[in-house]
Image (cartoon, grey):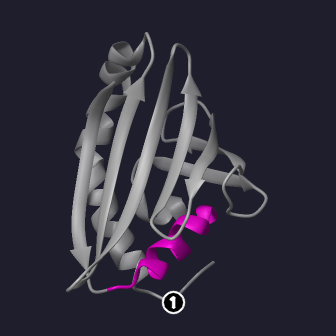
Amino acid sequence: MTTPATASLTSPLPASAFFARWADMSTWSDWNVDTERVRLDGPFIEGATGVLKPQGGPQVPFLITRLDEHAFVDESRLFGARLVCAHVVSPVEEGTRVDVTVTLTGPLAAAWRVILGGGIVRTLRQDLDSLVVAAGTNSHR
C-alpha cells in the first residue's frame, strides 16, 4: 500500500455540514480543483456507485465502501490498482476534525502513484480548505 496524500484540518462546523457537501456530488467541481464533474447513481449510501471525471483525465467509476456518521470512503478500481479516498470526521472541542487520506494498493500502485500522486499531493489541502468554505455556506445548486 502507498499513501500519496493526506490532509487534515479542524473546523467549527458540525460533521453534518461536511457530509452534506460530500453527498451533493454535483457541486464537487465547485470546491475540488482537480474534478471536472461527479455523478452519483442514486442516493448517497454505502454501496452506491458513480463516476468521477478528473480534469484532463478519463472518467473513473467509484463505489462508496463505507458511509456512517464517522466516515465516507470511496474506492476506484484502476488498471492493476485500487484507489481509496477516506474522509473521516471526529468531534473535537473546537468543532470537527476532518482527515482525508488517499491510498493506492495493488501490483501497479507505485506506477499509479507517479501518474496521480503529484496532482493529489498538490491540491488535496487546497480542496479541503475549499470544502470548509463550501460546507459553511447554505447555497446549493
- What amino acid is labelled 1 in the image? Asn
Q: Is residue 18 left or right of residue 63?
A: left
Viewer-side residue, 71 vs 82: 71
Is 78 located above or below residue 86 in the figure?
above
Indicate the position of residue 52 as horizontal and vertical percent values: 60, 44
SS category of the residue bearing label 1: loop
Viewer-side residue, 127 vs 5: 5
Judging by the rendered image, the residue that carries numbered circle 1 is 138
Q: Residue at x 46, y 81 (%)?
A: 17
Q: Magenta span covers which residues? A: 13-26
Q: What predominant SS class does the magenta segment belong to?
A: helix
Is 55 located above or below residue 107 in the figure?
below
Indicate the position of residue 118 as horizontal and vertical percent values: 26, 32
Q: Quadrant of residue 44?
A: bottom right
Is 57 located above or below residue 105 in the figure?
below
Indicate the position of residue 23 as horizontal and vertical percent values: 60, 67
